[in-house]
Amino acid sequence: MTGKFQSVDDTGLGNHTMGEGTFLVVPGVVVQDVWPRVEKFKDLNVYPDLSPTGRDVNRAVRDFGAVVVEVQPNGRFRINVAAGPAVVCLLTYSGCVELTLPESGSVNAYWSVGGFDMG
């Protein structure tokens, strides 16, 4: 599936294409598979960064079959994993989200003052 990465502006200036970024996509998992069962995270679906896992990117790739996805200069990216539950982390800045990747179509990623989101 493909997507576009944008910065979201809440001041009225409009959204802008983000021409750089790196995502870590962990397919087939929900966040409880990646993060330890920490009480403060139990009802969230957006997470601050990878630090609660105690795992680095290489370990996430090895342990969970994660893939690293680079954003192209035009803001476009391609995620080559199976549809279904996934945890996606924005490594360039910070933040992770839990979502269900669709079987077809596209997903968009957003960076704003509120953090990272994808959907």
Image: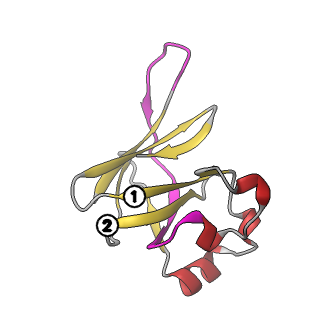
Mark 1 neighbour class, 10 Å CA radius: few under 14, some 14 to 19, many 20 or more: some
Number of numbered discs overlaid on the protein picture: 2
Amino acid on which the number 1 mark rests in the picture: Thr
Question: Does 18 sit above or below residue 100?
Answer: above
Identify the residue at image location x=40%, y=58%: 100
Mark 1 vs mark 2, CA separation in Å: 7 Å
Mark 2 neighbour class, 10 Å CA radius: few under 14, some 14 to 19, many 20 or more: some
Local secondary structure at mark 1: strand
Q: Position of residue 14 (x, y in %)?
A: 44, 20
Identify the residue at image location x=40%, y=46%: 119
Is disc 1 in contact with disc 2, using a CB cutoff of under 8 Å?
yes
Residue 18 within the magenta-colored segment of the rendering: yes
Q: Which residue is mark 1?
A: 100
Specify start and end residues of the magenta stretch as a single range: 9-31
Identify the residue at image location x=60%, y=78%: 60
Q: Position of residue 50 (x, y in %)?
A: 68, 63
Q: Which residue is mark 2?
A: 83
- Screen quadrant of the N terminus: bottom left
